[in-house]
Image: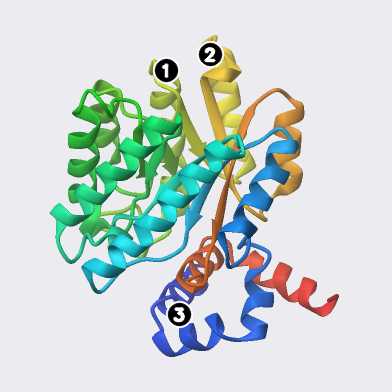
Amino acid sequence: MPFLRSGFIALSRNRQLRGFCENSTIGSRLSSRFIAGMEIEDALRVAEAVNKQGMSVTLDSLGESVTSETEAHRAADVYHQILDLIAARKLNSNISVKLTQMGLTLDPALAENIAASLAEHAHATGSFVRIDMEDSSLTQVTLDIVRRLHARLDLHGSIGIVIQAYLHRSKADIEQLIAEGIRVRLCKGAYKEPASLAFPRKSDVDASYIQLSGMLLQSPIYHGLATHHEAMIEAAKSFAAAHGIDRNHFEFQMLYGIRRDLQRKLVADGYNVRVYVPFGREWYPYFMRRLAERPANVFFIAKNLLHQ
């Protein structure tokens, strides 16, 4: 349903609706399926519960483009707290970070310095920083920053990146990232992009995802395949089995609140699963992109609201 996808992406940029939703009781109820809560403690409580089910976690403090250096450092401080708390509570978790939240659109050097400090902290506490990918206008600068930081001997292996299968450029990007030993989370992509940059048809995106997942599985690096699509999961499982790739060589990644049944089944079958657990008061854009990715979630949420 392309029109629904476009509609939700447009709504994700609506400031008035965002302000209403993020500050209303009904908004909190709407978001609770996919958002762990508003505070750090909410996210840690969910992370602990997910760990007890045999799955690892990546924590994301929600927020995107900031308007000042002060805001960027304030956002980074939340992640520094999280890294310390992950270590103190011995959680099986890492963190996911958007560079626009660290000031990328204000000053790329600011974002790079903040990302470096987070990667240094992660390295010191035995954790890992995943840099999320945003829209295509930021793809190259995000790749450049991650590659520079990963090249530092003291940060090697402490920072990774996300690649979106719907972009035409992603095959070449993955070839380069594999050559440099950088860990990748592969997802389909959740932003509205022109056909000149991204595959417009779902079938082409699916074919790209399967091709790229095969490249990642055959590399010597531990990667993550982020999908709830059972056909994509089965393709990866079949590819791994056919090529003698151990199940501990990679992980499937899924979003908090989506396909919990499938998450549990994969764990029971001996696969590694990591759950992406977002939290925070700036949840609206993330929430709308989840609806854009899978409009069926709208009906699921409406059903749950009626039963509350």
Residue 25 lies left or right of residue 211; in this view the side is right
Q: Which residue is mark 1?
A: 218
Give the image location of residue 232, x and y in percent. 56, 38
User: Which of the image's four quarters has the C terminus?
Assistant: bottom right
Q: Are marks 2 and 1 in contact (CB under 8 Å)?
A: yes
Alpha carbon separation for disc pair 2 and 1:
8 Å
Going from N to C along the chain, the mark reached first, 3 or 1, is 3
Picture quadrant where residue 265 is located: top right
Which of 252 and 150 lies nearest the eye of the viewer? 150
Picture quadrant where residue 64 is located: bottom left
Dot 3: element: helix
Alpha carbon separation for disc pair 3 and 1:
39 Å
Crowding near pointer 1: few (<14 within 10 Å), some, many (20+)?
some
User: Which of the image's four quarters has the N terminus?
Assistant: bottom right
Q: What residue is rendered at 54% in x and 45% in y?
A: 85
Q: Look at the picture and state if 187 lies above or below 269.
A: below
Dot 2: element: loop
Q: Which residue is mark 3?
A: 11
Give the image location of residue 78, x and y in percent. 43, 57
Q: What residue is rendered at 68% in x and 43% in y?
A: 48
Which of 212 and 290 lies nearest the eye of the viewer? 290
Which of 118 and 276 lies nearest the eye of the viewer? 118
Q: Look at the picture and state if 305 lies above or below 167.
A: below
Q: Which residue is mark 2?
A: 245
Q: What residue is rendered at 44% in x and 75% in y?
A: 12
